[in-house]
Structures are given as structure tokens and as C-alpha cells.
Amino acid sequence: MFVDPIRERGEGSHRVGMQNSACRAMFRDMDRIPKICWRLGDRDGRHTRASVAPTVVGVQSGRALDDPGWSTASGTQMDIWTINNGNNQKWTLNNLGNNTVKLINVFSGLALEVKQSLKTNGAVVDQATYTGAANQQWTVVQVSSGIYNLKNVNSGEVLDVAGKKTADGTLVDQWPSNNGTNQQWKFQ
């Protein structure tokens, strides 16, 4: 069942209703991302209503983007791991407009970022307190139906599973887009 977004308090502010523990949101910039429950905020980043957070799953590996060891430490490098439905593998996507989101790990409450705003190939992708910096913002780019790249706003490089590996514990970094399935992600 489709749930229409409800506009609240002016431009850029939305609320999505919940029904049967699932929701689908379609609104302006994010209408190409199906079956994702969003935590939406106005342009100042305040949240209007919380929703269920998806697991971000690598297309090549079938493994989840993971906060290893359920870490709450800033600076912990992210990896991939077998899907376990834990909150360390769930990410709240906050719409910043223009297909750009911030991803906040449900367990740690920290943002996915490129460490130290580096722009180099292979730079570490870790978690840290959200500051609003461009290295903590990701543009969602549709590759095909239900498949996306997450492009870092600061560097222009995409979220990448290092070395095209598929094993649990493989680290995640940034790399120029090369159409590899190790750079493609699904939201489930």
C-alpha cells in the first residue's frame, strides 16, 4: 500500500505515515528510491518524524554495510558483514535535498563519512559525529532498478568495497566510479 507524503511547515519539510510496519515514500528528489522508509527533516536537519531504517546491502557481496563490533567510537572504519538484522547494519537516511542524504547508523548514532575529508582513492570510510560537512553527505545515484551508487559530495568518489572482496570484515573505502558491482548498493 502506498502512503503519500504529507507536507508540513513549508518547503522541504515532509512527514511519511507508517502502515503495517512498512512504508514507501515518494517525494521530490528521492522519488526514484522505492520501498525505503525515511527519517525526514527540514533543510536545517531537524527531524519531523522517525521511520524504519534500511540495511544497505552490497550488490556484489550480498553483505551489509556494517558498523563492526557494534562500535560507538568515532573513527571506526566500516566494513561489510553477513546480514544479521542488527541495528549496527541499519542506516537512517536523512534527505538533504537534490538526491543527497546523510546516513546515520542506528546503533552508534554516528554518520557515515570519508575520514578527514580526504579526496584520495582508497580513503577510509568511517563513522563520526555528524557536523554537516560535505564528507558526511552522499548523493544517491541510480544505476538500475533498485541499485544505487553512493557518491560522496566532498570527493566525488563512490562508496566502494575494497579490492572487490566479498568476505565478512572486508573494509569499505571510496574509489572513483568504475561501474563495478562492489560499488553498487541496495536498500532493504
Image: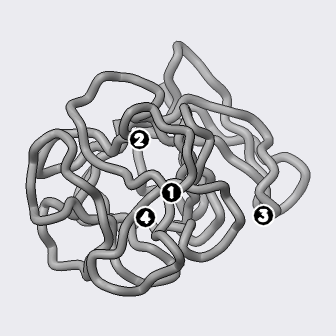
| Helix, strand or loop at mark 4 | strand
**Horizontal and vertical percent for residue 115?**
48, 70
Write the residue at 17% across / 50% down.
59
**Marks 2, 3: nearer the viewer:** 2
* Residue kind at label 3, given as amino acid type: Arg
Nearer to the camera, 42 or 110: 110
Badge number at residue 67: 2
**Horizontal and vertical percent for residue 36?**
46, 39
Q: CA distance from mark 1 to mark 4?
A: 23 Å
* Residue kind at label 1, given as amino acid type: Gly
Which of disc 3 and disc 2 is earlier in sequence? 3
* Coloring scheme used: one colour
Q: Is residue 166 above or below residue 10?
A: above
Q: CA distance from mark 2 to mark 1?
A: 11 Å
Which quarter of the rendering shows the C terminus? top left
Which of disc 3 and disc 1 is earlier in sequence? 3
Q: Is residue 176 above or below residue 129?
A: below
Which residue was labeled with disc 1?
Answer: 75
Image-based side of 66 in relation to 58, left or right: right
Q: CA distance from mark 2 to mark 3?
A: 27 Å
Residue 95 appears in which quarter of the rendering?
Answer: bottom right
Which residue was labeled with disc 4?
Answer: 140
Which residue was labeled with disc 3?
Answer: 43
Q: Is residue 90 above or below residue 165?
A: above
Farthest right residue in view? 9
| Helix, strand or loop at mark 3 | loop
